[in-house]
Amino acid sequence: MIVPTSPTANDYRRALAVVAGLAVLVLAGWLGGRVAERWALIDLRRSAVSALGLQVAAFGAEMQTQSSLPLALAADPEIARVVAPAPEPALVAEVNGRLAQIAEATGATVIYVVGSDGVTVAASNAAAEKSFVGRDYGFRPYFREAMTTGSGSQFALGTVSGRPGYYLARRLPRAAGVVVVKIEFDAIEATWRASRESVFVTDPRGIVLVASETNWRFKALRSVDEAERRRIRETLEFGEAPLSPLPVYATSEAGDLVRVGGGARPAWPALMLDAPIPGTAWRLHTLTPIAAAVQRERAQGRAIALLTTGLAWAGLATLIGRRRRMRVQLAEAATRHEELEARVAERTQALSEANRQLLAEIEERRRAQAERERLGRELAQAGRLAALGQFAASMAHEINQPLAAIRSYADNTAILVRRGRVEDAAENVGAIGRLTERIGTLTRQLKGFARRASGRREPVRLAEIFRGSLEVISWRAAQSGIALDVASPAPDLAVLGDGPRLEQVVVNLLQNALDAVAERPDPRIAVRVEVAEDRIAVEVADNGPGIPEAVRAQVFDPFFTTKSEGLGLGLAICRGIVEECGGTLGLRSGAEGTTFRMELARAVAPSEEAQDSKSIGSLEAI
């Protein structure tokens, strides 16, 4: 008969150690998973913030592209005339055609002009079946806001097209009406969908206006009260949209962690971040899925924690057992020691493999960050190249003047050489050299703009400015039979500024004067100099027909011109050059003609050696 033995104290201690070890392993696995999950969220949040900044910049750039268009159109005199009582049909047809061309060139959906009574009188879609002409938009908030404050904007559903869009309105002079530009965001939404990004834009009420998910449009992040709903229905802002809640639900874990439901797939956890869009009251939201990344990091964290704790616990148990076994038999302890080393090596290999995988993922994230930075630099460079193109157009406008003068001097030089007048020919060759230096200066200005360079400010002789300007313009005056009455400033009279650029200003003013007196029976152009203690004024006067008072305040605006083939850049560039040199440029005009007055700071004239050295350096730079 076998008598059962009772458990000993060692058995109790062994069972207690096993239970404690299991509890430590479970706790270590849980803690490791939580820590890894938190690190994963921090990393995802950092990446999402960077992506959010890029999305806001791209959306803001699209908004800014169209924001200045209503302001420019509101200053158009023909648009102001079309809202007058009983406008001419030919004028209305011409404005409709121009609006259609501008809409196609700028990417605007539609541009239309609304009279003070709210009725549309001209539109870019006047020839379309669903034309806006004759429709009443006086109930629209953007119309009322523009008529009251001068400008207005509204995102709403089109009453004719049924398509949502952003309306930008600007009041016409004398409150005669409003010019409106509608833009749509279909291209941006398509880009978001193509990149599989969950992005949407809300207004201050939390209503979704633009979204990568089409069915999210006109849903709300928060409830909309009944009074606001009634106001929205009265203004036909969103049609019959029910303004139902957006399927985004907050979780109890963190303020930016949500669950996204609806659609074909089940609800999924995401990190929701938002930022304001500059220049508007809107906010852009991004939803970054976190399930895959968090589960992967959690599993790795648990594995590492369990492996580390298991190794530590196994080591502790082995040491205890070793001490006990050492008292029993040294040989048995040596064998078990070898087994322990083999187990440690095996588990260390697994830990190394997990570490290599972690390093590979870190490197992948680093490459993604570098790619995002590269895209940001390319976006900034694209904006700079667009500005450089506009500046290059103005440089071409200015270079044509000295090129025409060079051609005239070259033809005269050939005639003088054939006649044996070598000295006169040499003087013409010197003039050609100075004009070539001027073209080189203009091209260096273009290069300086590309390098973010700034203009010089240095003493320059007024006589040198006049001489260089007359070399460019005298040939045209001679061909037109127009006498130039140009004052001869003292040799030591100097102003503070950039000599070649000030020549550009004088040449442009003389060119405008020649254009103004071209049809006059007794054309006269005079250049006068007024000297004060610390200022010098240069006036270019003509006896042309003068500038109408209605457009006199706009002559310095970019792209404003009264010439059929003009760019509208000359006077705007001239004012910019004079102001960069610390001076002012203004005008006065009447029936007796027009006078442009340029005032600059007086300076001490440079020495002849410094002037010669600067000229040689300019020729070498060419």
Image (tube, rainbow, N blue to C red):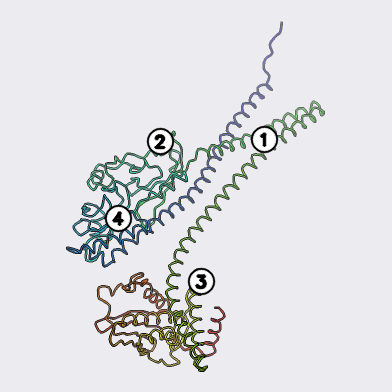
State how far apart marks 1 and 3 are (Cα): 67 Å
State how far apart marks 2 and 4 are (Cα): 32 Å
Q: What label does residue 263 carry, if any? A: 2
First in sequence: mark 2 vs mark 4: 4
Q: Kindly report which numbered mark, 4 or 1, lies closer to the viewer in this rendering.
A: 4
Q: Is residue 213 above or below residue 323?
A: below
x, y (%) of residue 601? 41, 84
> On the picture, is 4 further left or further right than 169?
right
Q: What label does residue 447 carry, if any? A: 3
SS assignment at label 3? helix
Residue that sits furthest to the right in the current view: 331
x, y (%) of residue 611? 52, 87
SS assignment at label 1? helix
Q: Kindly report which numbered mark, 1 or 2, lies closer to the viewer in this rendering.
A: 2
Residue holding disc 1: 312
Q: Is residue 315 above or below residue 104?
A: above
x, y (%) of residue 620? 57, 80
Q: Kindly report which numbered mark, 2 or 3, lies closer to the viewer in this rendering.
A: 3
The three-letter code of the residue at mark 4 reads: Ser
Q: What label does residue 153 carry, if any? A: 4
